[in-house]
Amino acid sequence: MAKFVLAGSANCPYFARAELLADNLETNLPDFKVHKIVKNPDEWENWLSDICKRNAWAHSSSPLIWRELLNRGGKGVLIGGSNEFQEYAAGYYGSSSAMKSSDMTTISSENMETHLSVTEEEEHMKSLSKPLHVCITNAASPVIYHMLNEIVSGDVIGRDTELNIHLLVEAEEIGVAEGVSLEAMDMASPLLREISVTADPNEAMNRASLIIVMDDLGQNENEPWEDWIRRCGTVYSNYGTIIHNWASSDCKVVVAGSGPLNLGAYLIQREAKNILRQNVIVPSRLPENRAKSAIARRINVNSSGIVDIIMWGNCGGSSHLDLSKGRVHGCEGAIWGPPSYSRPIKDMVHDDKWLQNEYLQTVKTHAERLQNALQRPASVSEAHAVVATISDWWSGDNNGQIYSLGVTSDGCYEIPEGLVFSLPVKFHQGSWRVVEDVSITNELKAELAKIVDELQREIEVIFPSPNKAKQSPETVEEVSEDNNNKKVFGVKEGSDSTPGVSDVQGPTNGEENEITRSGPLSRIAEESETDTKEGTTVTETDEV
């Protein structure tokens, strides 16, 4: 597909001639697409200078025409002005414009009148609406490219909420992000009031009611673990300070991407003292969805029918996969029931050996196999996992399902208060609440204690105690009395006490996640062993 951008001053006769030619080509060629940018005469010079400087182009008049190569992973290629576009169209498409000079002048005057009328109407409409400001960091990432469609369609925030989206990128990536913003505008969504690109985080997070942190902060090769934690800590702490100074007081923050995500959420809510602690979360949906899809393929059901799988622990590190409350809907068998009818995962799989071995190996290698097949990191599933979490958080899940979510602990399940930890939650009308009736075996308790120690070691790197001893999150939290006043309340749910099944552990020092055995299935496996050692450990890469 050939996509061209035609930009110019509203009163420019040469813009009128190029516009007519571009419209004819778009009408007659199915793969020819044009995006128009019309500026007021008093805005044109500054806008032209800015975009040429960013793209290292040499052009000084109206119009400015370039071809977008975003789908090929590159920035736009400059064509030039009206004459250059005429030559380009004649050479490639055998088409040209025979518009007379008098017609060019007449049409340019009409264009100016139309532009002023449209601008006045747009300003009036903007004055009547109060759009929700959304900031997305690392906006040049392919994940954000796939995320935008779901956000502006109304499926995430709501179909009656207009959006102002601010894309935050590094200065050298502004060109790519500009292409992403053009794609978003080309969707012609009635809910997208405005989309902007900036390298200034203060500007991007100004008045934001939703901030999606998607930074790629993976550990570099040969980078010491403590240096990596400090580098990430600086980024997240700076975000927290900016959010405190610029974002809306009711702002919701989603910490995703890659890196020590739980630590990131902890530092952001620590620095953003005006934001409620329950408004900073870390999604666990991607590894949770992958665990569901592995079971769905095994028993031949839709993966959406696998519910209530729990991912405990560190969303950017070690975690524990728990199937104790997991159930299956829509399964075929001798017993049928209404859509609400479900059966435990263990009963449907009916293969403890597979659950303890092959299943864990399948979950472990899924991300690697997917990346090898695509020849690039997965982005669609990651984007959907983030927006699905936001959608459930914003509007609530009507089915009452249990999901996993990195949240600030209030002390439930003996997780230290103030520590950000992935826990089982339910969503309801814009909030979440911890499910507190999950049965915790001694084996699971030991695994959770290891993950707590891992998270506390990360915090210790950022806030070392004078005597080098391990410092609990409560001690670090005492730095801010305001934060101590923020509470996260868990709500007891149900009475099911089915024990746990298996563990998944993720990267700690930049390594892969580990999957271990625990719960009744591990005891079944241990009956054939001569000792009572804990299950062996393998690894899995966790991307969210």
Image (cartoon, helix red, strand yellow):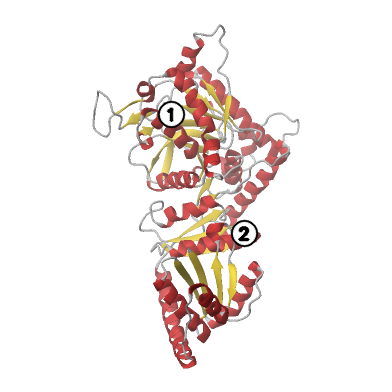
The numbered mark at residue 100 is: none
* Residue 328 located left or right of residue 61: left
Residue type at the position of mark 1: Glu
- Does residue 211 appear in the picture of this structure? no
Residue type at the position of mark 2: Glu
Residue indicated by mark 1: 436
Q: Is residue 89 above or below residue 526?
A: below
Local secondary structure at mark 1? loop
Residue indicated by mark 2: 173
Q: Position of residue 183 (x, y in %)?
A: 48, 62
- Separation of marks 2 and 1 at Cα, in angstroms: 44 Å
- Please name which of the two marks, 2 or 1, marks the residue nearer to the observer: 2
Q: Nearer the viewer, residue 474 or 226?
A: 226
The image shows a total of numbered marks equal to 2
Residue 434: which quarter of the image? top left
Q: Position of residue 291 (x, y in %)?
A: 46, 32
* Residue 538 located left or right of residue 343: right
Residue at image location 70% in from the left, 40% down from the top: 221
